[in-house]
Image: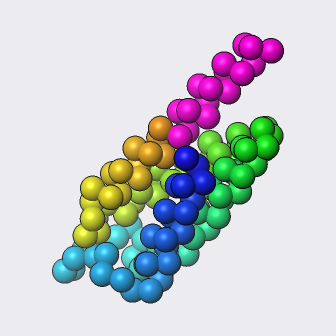
């Protein structure tokens, strides 16, 4: 799921760089420049992809980067909620929270099983 989040954020970031119609009328963003938001989402997507691939290997590095990527993804989704698709941003927010919760909770179960 973290890899899926990374791909979605990469696509959303590329759409922001391409000046796609994701903003309605005179909508103001927290990040005032649309290309800045695009680059932030691309970097965030890359972090999430790295964390997801490392999680497949079962590394502690993957868990750490996964939690950081999930939290940053949730914050980024909340910052982009003023666009033309607020439900999309909310869906990404809840998906990021769910992934972060899953990494934290299921990691504890693994330690108990050992």
Location of residue 80 by image quarter? bottom left
Residue 33 % position (x, y): 42, 80
Quadrant assignment for the C terminus: top right
* Main secondary-structure element of the magenta-colored stretch: helix
Residue 73 % position (x, y): 51, 54
> Can see residue 49?
yes
Residue 82 % position (x, y): 28, 64
Total marks shown come to 0
Location of residue 95 by image quarter? top left
Q: Residue at x 55, y 63 (%)?
A: 7
Question: Residues in magenta?
Answer: 99-114
Residue furthest bottom in the image = 18
Question: With 16 as the anchor, is 87 left or right in this view?
Answer: left
Q: Is residue 84 magenta?
A: no
Question: With 33 as the anchor, is 112 left or right in this view?
Answer: right
Residue 57 % position (x, y): 79, 43
Q: How is the image coloured?
A: rainbow
> Can see residue 40?
no
Q: Residue at x 35, y 57 (%)?
A: 89
**Which of 9 and 41 lies nearest the eye of the viewer?**
9
Q: Residue at x 67, y 21 (%)?
A: 108
Question: Does residue 64 lie above or below 114 as drawn?
Answer: below
Question: Does residue 19 lie above or below 85 as drawn?
Answer: below
Location of residue 86 by image quarter? bottom left
Q: Is residue 108 magenta?
A: yes
Question: Does residue 77 lie above or below 10 as drawn?
Answer: above
Q: Residue at x 45, y 70 (%)?
A: 12
**Which of 101 and 54 lies nearest the eye of the viewer?**
54
């Amino acid at each position: 799921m973290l890899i899926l989040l990374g791909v979605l954020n990469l696509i959303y970031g590329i759409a922001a760089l391409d000046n796609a119609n994701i903003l309605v009328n005179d909508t103001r963003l927290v990040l005032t420049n649309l290309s800045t938001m695009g680059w932030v989402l691309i970097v965030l997507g890359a972090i999430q992809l790295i964390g997801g691939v490392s999680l497949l290997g079962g590394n502690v590095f993957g868990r750490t980067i996964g939690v950081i990527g999930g939290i940053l993804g949730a914050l980024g989704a909340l910052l982009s909620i003023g666009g033309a698709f607020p439900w999309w941003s909310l869906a990404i927010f809840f998906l990021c929270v769910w992934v972060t919760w899953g990494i934290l909770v299921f990691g504890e179960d693994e330690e108990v099983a050992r």
